[in-house]
Image (tube, rainbow, N blue to C red):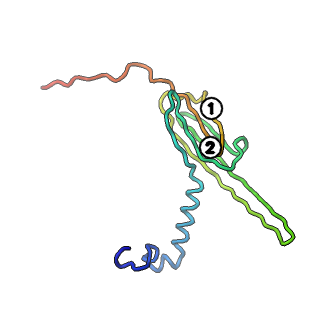
């Protein structure tokens, strides 16, 4: 516990004017929205391929996902649309979840966009980008002389 805060938290230390206008709630809402629109990914090299995996649970990959390669950038876009409705004798309940997700990844030199493959399994989109081995000579050592 920080001295002087007692049982109060950081939101309680905020100036009264900011609390009066609902800043803590607006900030929390902003963070929640930002987290839901940011597509979580992992990237790694697997032999001669760059592998990008993205968490996309509960979507239809054929209908709701778009993967494109332009110049040296891989773009992943997805949109979730989920509606449920339950009718019972006691009433009616309807819920929906929706959101758009996007992520761009800079591709390494030698990436071959025309050979990209994407697959979806158990809520994870996997994109494999073949990367040509570096051509030409490797690094050249330069001697340093004394004047």
Image label count: 2
- Find out whether the residues at labels 2 and 1 contact each other: C-beta distance under 8 Å: no
Q: Secondary structure at mark 2?
A: strand
Q: Nearer the viewer, residue 80 or 16?
A: 80
Instruction: Mark 2 vs mark 1: give the one in front.
Output: 2
Instruction: Determine which residue is flagged by label 2.
Output: 124
User: How far is disc 2 from disc 1 in space, using C-alphas?
Assistant: 14 Å
Q: Quadrant of the C terminus?
A: top left
* Residue 104 location, quadrant: top right
Outermost residue toward the top? 137
Q: Residues within 10 Å of mark 1 (few under 14, many from 20)?
A: few
On screen, 46 above or below 137? below
Q: Residues within 10 Å of mark 2 (few under 14, many from 20)?
A: some
Q: Quadrant of the N terminus?
A: bottom left
Picture disc at residue 81: none
Q: Nearer the viewer, residue 76 or 60?
A: 60
On the image, the x and y values in percent for residue 139 come to: 34, 24
Residue 25 in the figure: left or right of residue 80: left
Residue shown at 49% from the left, 37% from the top: 44
Q: Of the residues under marks 2 and 1, which one precedes in the sequence? A: 1
Residue 127 in the figure: left or right of residue 95: left
On the image, the x and y values in percent for residue 36 come to: 59, 56
On the image, the x and y values in percent for residue 21 come to: 53, 76
Q: Secondary structure at mark 1?
A: strand
* Residue 129 location, quadrant: top right
On screen, 110 above or below 43? above
Instruction: Determine which residue is flagged by label 1.
Output: 117
Outermost residue toward the left? 147
On the image, the x and y values in percent for residue 73 come to: 54, 37
Residue shown at 28% from the left, 23% from the top: 141
């Amino acid at each position: 516990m920080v001295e002087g805060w007692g049982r109060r938290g950081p939101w309680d230390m905020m100036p009264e004017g900011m609390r009066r206008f609902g800043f803590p709630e607006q900030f929390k809402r902003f963070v929640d929205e930002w987290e839901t629109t940011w597509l979580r990914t992992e990237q790694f090299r697997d032999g001669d391929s760059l592998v990008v995996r993205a968490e996309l649970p509960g979507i239809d990959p054929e209908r709701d996902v778009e993967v494109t390669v332009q110049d040296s950038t891989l773009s992943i876009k997805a949109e979730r649309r989920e509606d449920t409705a339950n009718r019972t004798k006691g009433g009616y309940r309807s819920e929906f979840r929706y959101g758009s997700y996007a992520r761009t990844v800079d591709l390494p030199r030698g990436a071959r966009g025309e050979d990209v493959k994407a697959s979806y399994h158990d809520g994870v989109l996997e994109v494999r980008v073949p990367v040509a081995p570096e051509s030409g000579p490797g690094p050249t050592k330069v001697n340093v002389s004394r004047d």
